[in-house]
Amino acid sequence: MICPLCNALTELKVQCSVCQNECEDKGRAMDYDENYSPYMDYELTALTDGLTKNNSNLFCAHLYYCKHCNDSAIKLIEKI
Ligand SMILES: [Zn+2]
Ligand SMILES: [Zn+2]
């Protein structure tokens, strides 16, 4: 099982729910756990924790960041 996004097989355009601009893919959310805690709020942390336990081998969590309104969202990418 590999993530199509991590392996550059596909691209996912994510629209910011606030300003409708395109969000940047910041890579796997897991990688941001330690170093980029400003991006992580409680909800985000809970989600990635849940992922680790339950379905991390089925989904890859990507962090999308909107530079316009400084918002971030987690998208679960189905592995192939
Ligand atoms: Zn991935
Ligand atoms: Zn935005």
Image (cartoon, grey):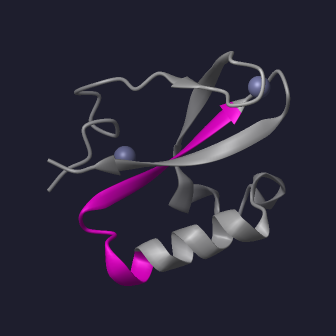
Whether the magenta-drawn stretch holds residue 58 is answered as yes
Give the quadrant of residue 56.
Answer: bottom left
Judge left or right: residue 45 versus residue 57. right
x and y percentages locating residue 7 in the rendered image:
27, 36
Q: Residue furthest top?
A: 21
Number of numbered labels in the structure image: 0
Whether the magenta-drawn stretch holds residue 24 is answered as no
Give the quadrant of residue 65.
Answer: top right
The boundaries of the magenta stretch are 52-65
x and y percentages locating residue 72 in the rendered image:
71, 42
x and y percentages locating residue 58 in the rendered image:
24, 63
x and y percentages locating residue 40 in the rendered image:
75, 59
Quadrant including the N terminus: bottom left
Judge left or right: residue 72 versus residue 38. left
Which residue occupies the foreground of this view, 16 or 32? Answer: 16
What's the residue at 54%, 69% (across, down)? Answer: 48
Residue 15 vertical position relative to residue 75 in the rendered view, above or below: above
What's the residue at 77%, 29% (across, down)? Answer: 18
Q: Residue furthest bottom?
A: 53
Which residue occupies the foreground of this view, 14 or 1? Answer: 14
Residue 7 vertical position relative to residue 75 in the rendered view, above or below: above
Residue 58 vertical position relative to residue 2 in the rendered view, above or below: below
